[in-house]
Image: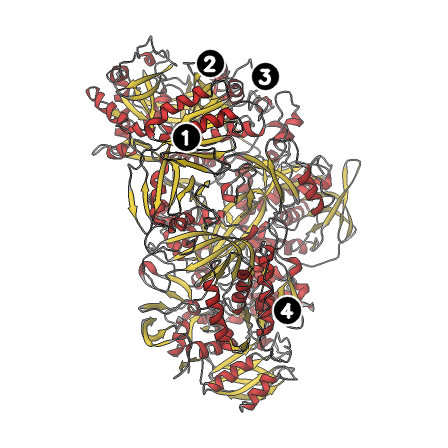
């Protein structure tokens, strides 16, 4: 594990919003029938959170569970724990039709911080209504970020996180830095 | 018909241009014609013109729902080229391009055919290979093209950034005798020539039904009365499905909106037409000075002739990257046209299940440049029941799995 | 630039999050199909000027397919519904009937 | 002369002087000036030349409708042509040049066109330049092109930044004039989220110029109060310098914010394009005054009456010392009164109406201004600027009654609501006979996703031209918009303004009414494109009677102002020529944008490094450091080869291939698609997806599979590994991963949704490295204690191993034909793996190799490559891949299609190997010729080359191709046609050139 390096190795940039790559982040895709108790139990046991509703994310300490689609969850956890947790999920769901796979290395994650303007930096790139009241902590939104797929959510009112595919981490980083460059303040979603 | 010439203009100037006659007459429809063409766009009028010119058939009516040339003929980006890969396409587009060369003189109407050259950029190894292949095919098809290197591209089009950090230009398929023409003029010129041959061009006349007897077409109902005919040609891009339905058959066609735009006019800065498929954009400069830019098509069935934004966005960003000088130009106007897409993106020029009823449709994004060639071949098909130009474009090919797919050589179908 | 509601994740989003996937409610024709049946399955597409049913995928979103009932002349959306159905739901057909009396599309009306 | 007045100019900060240059001349204005007002203040009346005749052109208007006063703005990389002076804020150091003339603005050779104007009527170019034929391209067209166009093209790379912003609102209000502000207030009070866009830097629009009182307060105070109220509302956002540019389907709109046009080089973006989704859109876009069509109405100094007034009130600038006012309505009297109050001379007001005007006319008379009813202008005197007017009876043919000296003419032909945004998305118009204008027809509004109208016009844009009516209309529109967007409006009544009595307008489409041909030839409709009344009449005479034909034939309304001043006058002229009513003639369609917007703003941030995503593998940096010559593969970047100092691409290829075959090479194969398919029905599903029988594959084994489209064509290939009873791992081509994953999900979700299968695209989870060559096992064994011997890991088997702490899957597959191992490790450890392999392989002189070496080596083995041997028209049977098409299966995607007559034809071109007789390399993409020509005169073709390379291994050219009856013609020699007309010969051979028995893959 010591040899593991995230896509941008934690690169950061200070604009009017701070942009940093979050480094190694464990992620597990769990597909299954989300109405089944077995699936819900396996997922929430692994995450230590409640089950998220549609387009929600529930977080607890170093873990979170996000709703990806009607038959898919994303479990976030410490990077090193992902392989073992996949195994636990598979064991827990033996006999239940499901798919649990480690996708920690397939993604990159960014953290935008600096208060309410994080909303407008994201709104420059994503076709999503990010106004307060329309997009709040707890919502997990998969969308388009410029020309690539992404997911965004707000851990709290002051920051915003972005997940994209690993291979386009550089592209997303550059876009976020441009959007956060001083002088570009819109002053709209604050 | 009074001939157009510089002399005629000088003569008319002396009397304040009060002596010019109508370019084409505006008669009431008669009860019967030998041939009725539905659709007064470029292809319909071209068909009528060659029925008269090549076969002496002049008892012809062209029925137009609105104003002639109001469909895609008046909405395209005016590019004329024939550097197609597949034999049937190369044949009909090269026939068309050849006709364009002398058409202004033939119909005494300046179509401003400008053989300034068209280049299709190769920006990936895959495109280099595709266009090299096309150049080889073209050489055997009698189409004058060559694959040129990046330096030659730069000489021909100095405003291009051939060393783009993303997609450096690796070369281009160059057709020196391709170019542009004035789209409206083609319609007006054909209408005038047809009218001069005694044909009736009837605007504001919508076909509401198609009549048949014993499996053969007998006439049409229109908003201006019933009209009988021996042969019927349906040439109505964007409305082919509805007319086919009236004639009792279905078409392998879906109609989608295609986007285009122009910039404000500037002094000449680009003497060739450039198409860049990798980044989805193509551009030329009109004689007025506008940069004429073609965009993408909507993915969904659409009959609104309106502009959309995201296709324009994709095209413009590609062209800003390829031609940095346009960053500070401004978009003047954008619009949409309805194009008929077939199952293989190639057109249909075909007999139909209804006897003596023929259909010419499905040109997708490539109709304008084919106009005279299409009219030539379709007229022959209507008269003789066969034309070498149209033979491969029959409806039956979809049943047989015999497609004419131009996308294979990284070719764009504009 | 259309705006569609994905019935799978409930998001109302702009067209760029979606990809269109052709005509709805097709019956797949396999090796047993006649030439005509197979041709019609692949190529004889509905292309109405008016009420139309089609498939879309929420490609930059939850990734799921769904159905859309839409007017191709005005781009009005009559409704979106599950991809896992063989026909438009009654509720959507009724809604269309109110707005486009006398409509029909393939075997549906 | 035009000049700066001693007093006035409500927008000016006279304490701040701003310096600028025009055509190199140093001039000065004040903060708050537009470039146009500053030019006028410096008596720069002529500012450009027209498009066709190169006539002198002056400032006509004061806003976005200006057709004439366009300049080239800025210098070097910030140069921008065709910039409208009336909407350009003056800033320190501004430089601009006038356009479309040579050698100078004052003396323009192109003006020769003007003296020959009678030979250049509308559409003259369609009728001439026909002979001699080559002259069009070589002589006529270049001359026409050079004479046309307006500004010069920019030359340098634009240094500025641009960005987009997505906004979602209940109500978008376009226009920050009085109507827009009131509509916003009404909607805001209802609780709706409101965004108000104003194209200028100022709020309140033209109302303060015209004056009046609202709720007992001066209108300026009312505006200030309204603004503070709106600014205090959390749910309302005001955005100045932002133009509502376009309206699209489903309530989508564009706002064009000129963030830094007034401060070039400032930090931040120059333009920001707002991508707005609105529940309802209120267009409070005001109205534009129409010119009158009289001879010489295009001379510099002839201006719109409202503009003359704007310049005095807003900028303290007079258009002239003596201004003649000519009108067909009461509004223009305000100009006369304003001028008089500013101490300027108004020698005469010409009111074309026989009955004259109402109370405003009385007021003007009361100030001592001479007013002539039923009179008009026969002709404006002067060459480069106005020197006087000849007066005539409006009802007559232009007999001159009197000449009056003046240096400016203020004209008003009535007002046209700005209906562009209403029309962009299909809104229809109705002709208001009483006011002689087209206004939005609320019954035929543009409709949105719910089928209801989503645009509401307000105020002058809705035809409510007066203060009181406009306010009431805007209030109603704001309330209605909020209500329709789901917010109940309050009951607060609309503010009240005094209604001024006015005499009705009388339409005047030609002045004088009976003007003869000589006058009509000098009566301009479209100033920029030089379209005159006579041109429209000519179009009508020649049968171009559809309004679209007229527009296209004459170019009326097609200039950069898109007919903002000319459309209605042109339509009316056409109607007159046809003897039709105006509404029967119809209008042309307004297209987005409202005024031109920069291309760069459309591109936004998608420029340079962020033009498109670049996908990088985990080892990207290592390749970069290793001299990678990059090749784009989709959005991926893959090394084509690795260049060492002084090497050519060919050298590098030869080195990489020789080294790999002799010893050891490494290939970064991370871009290969990797898709997991899992579930009880996975085997059944795989059998449908692939032509092969996949359900019988044993866990621990791999199989090469083919995937076809439903139309029968080969779309992808790759190695499938069975991970366990329920799970398959499908490798796809690099470009095909997303497509194949989408293809699988489509079938699962839309056809076989009752099958229990889940898929996941794990392409990016793994870094994948091909360890290739005779020394591959030896190298790998150094890194692992696990058994990877030939016995433990047989060809086409896979297993899991530990590589010094990195967990890996290893596949025994051999695309290059050598002993090789493909390793898949977690992507974050890819770089570490690569470094390890380079180190462990050093003793074998390990070299990374690129995509081209991979291509050559696979061709030496006769393996097909998707995209080379296939092009979307090729079926597996063409490639002799029958062995990979299961005969035992009833069905797979593409099976029925492959049974169609053309697909089963024995005449299909099929895969063979090709070798030139002299060992040279066949040209790529070359075609084999048959006898004779086809019915279209094209040479018959019987085959083509699909892959062709120099094989360093064999020391000669090798190729693959598709040839008619190919496999049955082994040994035959074919002729291939080169582009120079010569032919090259090649023999048909088996397509396996190297190690035909496949011994090398076992080491």
Q: Residues within 10 Å of mark 2 (few under 14, many from 20)?
A: some
Secondary structure beneath label 4? loop
Same chain? Circles 1 and 3: no
Circle number at residue D697:
2
Task: Tell me where residue B213 sits by quadrant.
Answer: top right
Residue D882 numbered mark, or none: none
Residue D308 lies, in percent from the top left, at 48, 78
| Label 4 chain ID | B
Q: Is residue D841 visible?
A: no
Q: On what subunit does the disc labeled 2 rest? A: D
Secondary structure at badge 1 equals: helix
* Cα gap from disc 1 to disc 2, whole angstroms: 36 Å
* Mark 1, residue position: A47
Residue under the point 56% across and 42% down:
C5
**For the residue labelled by badge 3, is the local secondary structure a helix, a strand or a loop?**
loop
Q: Are marks 3 and 4 in contact (CB under 8 Å)?
A: no
User: Picture coordinates of residue B45 (x, y %)?
Assistant: 64, 50
> Where does label 4 land, which residue?
B19
* Residue bearing mark 3: D890
| Residue D378 picture quarter | bottom right
Quarter occupied by residue D428: bottom right
Q: CA distance from mark 3 to mark 4?
A: 76 Å
> Label 1 vs label 3: CA separation?
45 Å
Which residue of the protein is positioned furthest toward the top in this rendering?
A: D791
As displayed, is residue B143 above or below residue D64?
A: above
């Amino acid at each position: 594990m010591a040899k593991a390096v995230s896509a941008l190795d934690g690169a950061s940039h200070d604009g009017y919003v701070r942009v940093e790559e979050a480094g190694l982040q464990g992620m597990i895709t769990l597909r299954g029938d989300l109405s089944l108790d077995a699936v819900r139990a396996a997922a929430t046991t692994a995450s230590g959170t409640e089950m998220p509703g549609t387009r929600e994310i529930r977080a607890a300490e170093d873990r979170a569970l996000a709703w990806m689609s009607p038959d898919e969850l994303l479990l976030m956890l410490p990077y090193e724990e992902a392989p073992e947790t996949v195994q636990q999920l598979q064991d827990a769901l033996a006999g239940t039709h499901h798919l649990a796979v480690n996708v920690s290395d397939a993604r990159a994650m960014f953290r935008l911080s600096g208060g309410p303007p994080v909303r407008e930096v994201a709104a420059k790139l994503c076709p999503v209504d990010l106004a307060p009241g329309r997009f709040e902590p707890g919502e997990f939104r998969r969308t388009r970020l410029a020309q690539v797929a992404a997911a965004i959510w707000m851990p709290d009112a002051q920051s915003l996180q972005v997940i994209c595919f690993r291979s386009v981490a550089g592209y997303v980083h550059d876009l976020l830095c441009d959007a956060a460059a001083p002088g570009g303040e819109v002053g709209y979603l604050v | 018909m009074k001939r157009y010439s510089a002399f005629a203009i000088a003569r008319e100037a002396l009397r304040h241009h009060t002596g010019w006659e109508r370019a084409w007459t505006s008669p009431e429809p008669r009860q019967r014609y030998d041939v009725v063409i539905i659709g007064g766009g470029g292809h319909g009028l071209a068909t009528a013109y060659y029925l008269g010119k090549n076969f002496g058939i002049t008892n012809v009516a062209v029925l137009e729902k609105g104003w002639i040339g109001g469909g895609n003929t008046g909405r395209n980006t005016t590019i004329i080229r024939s550097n197609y890969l597949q034999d049937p396409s190369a044949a009909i587009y090269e026939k068309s391009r050849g006709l364009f060369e002398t058409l202004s003189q033939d119909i005494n109407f300046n179509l401003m055919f400008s053989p300034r050259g068209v280049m299709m950029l190769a920006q990936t190894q895959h495109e280099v290979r595709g266009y090299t292949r096309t150049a080889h095919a073209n050489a055997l098809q009698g189409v004058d093209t060559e694959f040129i290197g990046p330096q030659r591209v730069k000489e021909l089009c100095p405003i291009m950034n051939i060393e783009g950090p993303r997609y450096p230009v690796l070369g281009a398929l160059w057709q020196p005798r391709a170019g542009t023409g004035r789209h409206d003029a083609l319609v007006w010129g054909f209408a005038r020539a047809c009218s001069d041959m005694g044909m009736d061009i009837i605007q504001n006349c919508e076909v509401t039904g198609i009549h048949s007897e014993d499996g053969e077409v007998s006439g049409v109902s229109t908003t201006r009365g019933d009209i009988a005919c021996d042969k019927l040609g349906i040439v109505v891009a964007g409305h082919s499905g509805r007319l086919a339905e009236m004639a009792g058959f279905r078409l392998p066609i879906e109609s989608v909106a295609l986007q285009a735009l122009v910039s404000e006019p500037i002094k000449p800065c680009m003497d060739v037409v450039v198409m860049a498929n990798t980044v989805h954009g193509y551009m030329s400069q009109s004689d007025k000075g506008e940069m004429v830019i073609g965009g993408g098509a909507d993915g969904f069935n659409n009959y609104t002739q309106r502009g959309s934004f995201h296709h324009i966005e994709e095209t413009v960003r590609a062209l800003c990257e390829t031609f940095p000088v346009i960053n500070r130009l401004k978009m003047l106007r954008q619009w949409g046209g309805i194009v008929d897409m077939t199952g293989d993106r190639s057109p249909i020029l075909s007999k139909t299940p209804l006897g003596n009823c023929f259909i010419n449709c499905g040109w997708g994004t490539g109709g304008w440049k084919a106009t005279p060639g299409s009219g030539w071949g379709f007229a022959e098909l209507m008269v003789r029941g066969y034309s070498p130009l149209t033979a491969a474009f029959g409806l039956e090919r979809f049943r047989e799995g015999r497609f004419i797919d131009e996308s294979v050589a990284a070719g764009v179908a504009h | 630039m259309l705006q569609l509601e994905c019935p799978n994740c409930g998001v109302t989003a702009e067209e760029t999050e979606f990809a269109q996937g052709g005509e709805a409610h097709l019956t797949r024709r396999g090796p047993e199909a006649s030439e005509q049946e197979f041709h019609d399955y692949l190529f004889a597409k509905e292309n109405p000027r008016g009420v139309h049913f089609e498939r879309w995928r929420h490609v930059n979103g939850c990734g799921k397919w769904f159905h859309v009932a839409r007017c191709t002349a005005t781009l009005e959306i009559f409704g979106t519904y599950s991809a896992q159905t063989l026909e438009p739901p009654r509720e959507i057909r009724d809604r269309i009937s109110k707005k486009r009396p006398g409509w029909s599309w393939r075997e549906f009306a | 002369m035009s000049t700066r007045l001693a007093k006035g100019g409500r927008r000016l900060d006279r304490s701040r002087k701003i310096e600028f240059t025009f055509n190199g001349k140093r001039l000065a204005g004040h903060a708050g000036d537009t470039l146009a007002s500053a030019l006028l203040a410096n008596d720069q009346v002529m500012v450009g030349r027209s498009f066709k005749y190169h006539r002198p052109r002056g400032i006509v208007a004061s806003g976005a409708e200006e057709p004439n006063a366009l300049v080239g703005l800025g210098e070097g990389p910030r140069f921008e042509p065709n910039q409208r002076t009336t909407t350009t804020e003056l800033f320190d150091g501004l430089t601009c040049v006038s356009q479309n003339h040579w050698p100078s603005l004052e003396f323009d050779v192109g003006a020769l066109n003007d003296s020959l104007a009678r030979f250049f009527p509308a559409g003259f170019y369609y009728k001439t330049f026909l002979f001699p034929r080559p002259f069009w391209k070589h002589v006529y067209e270049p001359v026409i092109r050079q004479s046309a166009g307006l500004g010069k093209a920019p030359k340098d790379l634009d240094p500025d930044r641009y960005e987009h912003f997505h906004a979602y609102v209940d109500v978008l209000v376009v226009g920050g004039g009085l109507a827009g502000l009131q509509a916003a207030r009404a909607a805001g009070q209802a609780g709706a989220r409101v965004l108000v866009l104003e194209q200028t830097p100022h709020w309140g629009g033209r109302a303060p110029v015209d004056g009046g009182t609202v709720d007992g307060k001066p209108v300026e105070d009312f505006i200030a109060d309204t603004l503070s109220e709106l600014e205090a509302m959390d749910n309302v956002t005001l955005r100045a310098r932002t133009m509502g540019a376009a309206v699209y389907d489903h309530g989508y709109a564009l706002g064009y914010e000129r963030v830094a046009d007034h401060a070039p080089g400032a930090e931040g973006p120059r333009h920001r394009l707002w991508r707005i989704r609105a529940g309802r859109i209120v267009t409070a876009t005001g109205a534009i005054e129409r010119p009158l069509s009289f001879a010489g109405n295009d001379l510099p100094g002839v201006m719109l009456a409202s503009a003359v007034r704007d310049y005095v009130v807003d900028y303290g600038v007079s258009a002239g010392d003596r201004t003649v006012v000519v009108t067909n309505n009461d509004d223009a009297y305000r100009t006369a009164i304003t001028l008089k109050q500013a101490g300027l001379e108004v020698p005469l007001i010409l009111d074309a109406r026989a009955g004259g005007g109402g109370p405003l006319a009385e007021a003007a008379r009361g100030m001592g201004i001479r007013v002539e009813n039923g009179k008009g202008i026969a002709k404006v005197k002067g060459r480069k600027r106005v020197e006087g007017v000849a007066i005539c009876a409006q009802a007559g043919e232009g007999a001159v009654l009197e000449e009056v000296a003046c240096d400016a003419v203020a004209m008003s032909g009535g007002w046209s609501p700005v209906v562009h945004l209403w029309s962009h998305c299909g809104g229809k118009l109705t002709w208001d006979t009483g006011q002689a204008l087209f206004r939005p027809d609320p019954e035929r509004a543009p409709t949105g996703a719910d089928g209801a109208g989503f645009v509401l016009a307000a105020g002058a844009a809705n035809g409510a031209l007066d203060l009181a009516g406009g306010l009431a209309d805007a209030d109603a529109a704001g309330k209605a918009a909020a209500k329709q967007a789901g917010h109940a409006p309050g009951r607060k009544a609309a503010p009240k303004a005094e209604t001024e009595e006015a005499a009705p307008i009388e339409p005047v489409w030609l002045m004088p009414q009976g003007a003869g041909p000589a006058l009509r030839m000098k009566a301009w409709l479209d100033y920029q494109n030089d379209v005159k009344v006579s041109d429209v009449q000519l179009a009508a005479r020649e049968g171009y009677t559809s309004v679209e034909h007229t527009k296209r034939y004459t170019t009326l309304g097609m200039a950069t102002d898109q007919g903002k001043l000319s459309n209605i006058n042109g339509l009316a002229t056409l109607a007159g020529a046809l003897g039709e009513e105006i509404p029967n003639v119809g209008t042309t369609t307004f297209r987005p944008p409202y005024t031109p917007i920069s291309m760069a703003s459309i591109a936004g941030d998608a420029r340079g490094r962020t033009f498109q995503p670049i996908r990088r593998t985990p080892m990207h940096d290592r390749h970069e450091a290793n001299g990678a010559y990059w090749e784009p593969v989709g959005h991926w970047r893959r090394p084509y080869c690795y260049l060492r100092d002084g090497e050519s691409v060919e050298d590098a290829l030869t080195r990489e291939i020789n080294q790999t075959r002799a010893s050891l090479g490494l290939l970064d194969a991370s871009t290969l698609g990797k898709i997991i398919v899992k579930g009880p029905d996975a085997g059944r599903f795989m059998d449908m997806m692939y032509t092969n029988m996949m359900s019988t594959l044993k866990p621990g084994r791999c199989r090469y599979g083919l995937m076809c489209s439903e139309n029968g064509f080969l779309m992808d290939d790759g190695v499938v590994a069975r991970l366990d009873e329920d799970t398959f791992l499908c490798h796809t081509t690099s470009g095909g991963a997303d497509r194949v994953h989408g293809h699988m999900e489509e079938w699962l979700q839309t056809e076989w949704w009752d099958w229990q299968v889940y898929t996941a695209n794990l392409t990016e989870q793994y870094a994948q490295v091909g360890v290739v060559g005779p020394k591959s096992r030896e190298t790998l064994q150094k890194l692992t204690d696990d058994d990877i011997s030939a016995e433990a890991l047989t060809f086409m088997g896979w297993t899991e191993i530990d590589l010094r702490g990195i967990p890996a899957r290893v596949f025994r597959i051999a695309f290059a034909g050598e002993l090789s191992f493909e390793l898949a490790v977690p992507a974050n450890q890819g770089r570490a793996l690569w470094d390890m392999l380079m180190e462990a392989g050093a003793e074998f002189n390990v070299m990374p190799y690129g995509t081209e070496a991979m291509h050559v080596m696979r061709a030496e083995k006769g393996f097909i490559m998707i995209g080379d041997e296939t092009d979307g028209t090729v079926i597996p049977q063409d490639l002799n891949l029958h062995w990979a098409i299961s005969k035992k299966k009833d069905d797979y995607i593409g099976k029925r299609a492959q049974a169609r007559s053309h697909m089963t034809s024995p005449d299909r071109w099929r895969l063979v190997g090709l070798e030139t007789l002299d060992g040279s390399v066949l040209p790529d993409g070359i075609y084999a010729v048959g006898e004779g020509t086809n019915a279209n005169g094209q040479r018959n073709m019987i085959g083509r080359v699909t892959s062709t390379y120099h094989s360093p291994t064999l020391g000669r050219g090798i190729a693959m191709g598709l040839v008619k009856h190919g496999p049955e013609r082994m040994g035959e020699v074919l002729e291939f046609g080169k582009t120079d007309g010569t032919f090259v010969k090649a023999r048909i051979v088996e397509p396996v050139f190297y190690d035909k028995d496949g011994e090398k893959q076992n080491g």
